[in-house]
Amino acid sequence: MCCCLTAILSLLLLLVSPSFAAEKPASTVRIADYLAVFDLEVVGQIEQSLSRPLSDSVRREVVKSGKYKVMERGQMDKILREQAFQMTGCVAKECAVEAGQLLGAGKVIIGSLGLVGKTYYLSLSQVNVETGETEVVEEEMCKCEVDG
């Protein structure tokens, strides 16, 4: 799993690189500067419990990049609950865009973690909430053990 975490970090650096987000003075923060990271969808024979820690790693790396104002998971849950929006089963891009609009985010990161044999597949997508366009897609695979 160690190499999967390394892969996540590498993918994040690509997702939030300067070519995708220009530096902005702190006083001019706009909706487009806010980014929401949704929990990874777990596909196949993977423990659901892996989703949250890996999603949290994604959030931390985006925060460390300094390119976006990242919404906290608890705040996202609170806002979506108030709006009676159900994230359960919400994995399609259209659903994430709708949730991003309710959250007031300019971009969202969605993704999945899958397992085929002993190979983990990680996919992350950065989606523009206003246009619904997928701006970046990165995928990585790791042939490793969960506790490796």
Image (cartoon, grey):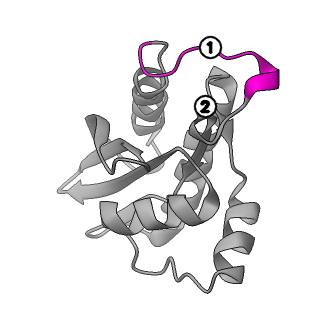
Give the residue type at disc 2.
Answer: Glu
Q: Which residue is the site of mark 1?
A: 23
Residue 26, relative to residue 8: is it above or below?
Answer: above
Marks 2 & 1, CB-CB < 8 Å contact? no
- Secondary element type, mark 1: loop
Residue 67, located in which quarter of the rendered image?
top right
Would residue 133 appear left or right of 47 to someone viewing this image?
A: left
- Is residue 40 visible in this depiction of the protein? yes
Q: Does the magenta-highlighted stretch encompass residue 118?
A: no
The mark found on residue 61 in the picture is: 2
Against 6, is 87 above or below?
A: below
Left or right: 98, with 119 as reference point: right
Rendered residue at 32%/45% (across/down): 122
Across and down, in percent, residue 87 comes to: 50, 76
Query: Can residue 27 be found in the magenta stretch?
Result: yes
Instruction: Name the residue rendered at 44%, 58% in the picture.
Output: 40
Q: Of residues 115 and 92, which is closer to you in this image?
A: 92
Q: CA distance from mark 2 to mark 1?
A: 17 Å
* Circle 2 crowding by C-alpha within 10 Å: few under 14, some 14–19, many from 20: some
Magenta region, main secondary structure: loop
Q: Position of residue 16 (x, y in %)?
A: 49, 25
Q: Which residues are magenta?
A: 19-28
Q: Residue placed at 80% from the left, 21% from the top?
A: 26
Label 1 sits on what residue type?
Glu
Q: Residue visible at 44% across and 35% down? A: 8
Expressed as whole percent of the image width and height from the top left, the position of residue 142 reads 28, 37
Q: Quadrant of the C terminus?
A: top left
Mark 2 secondary-structure assignment: helix
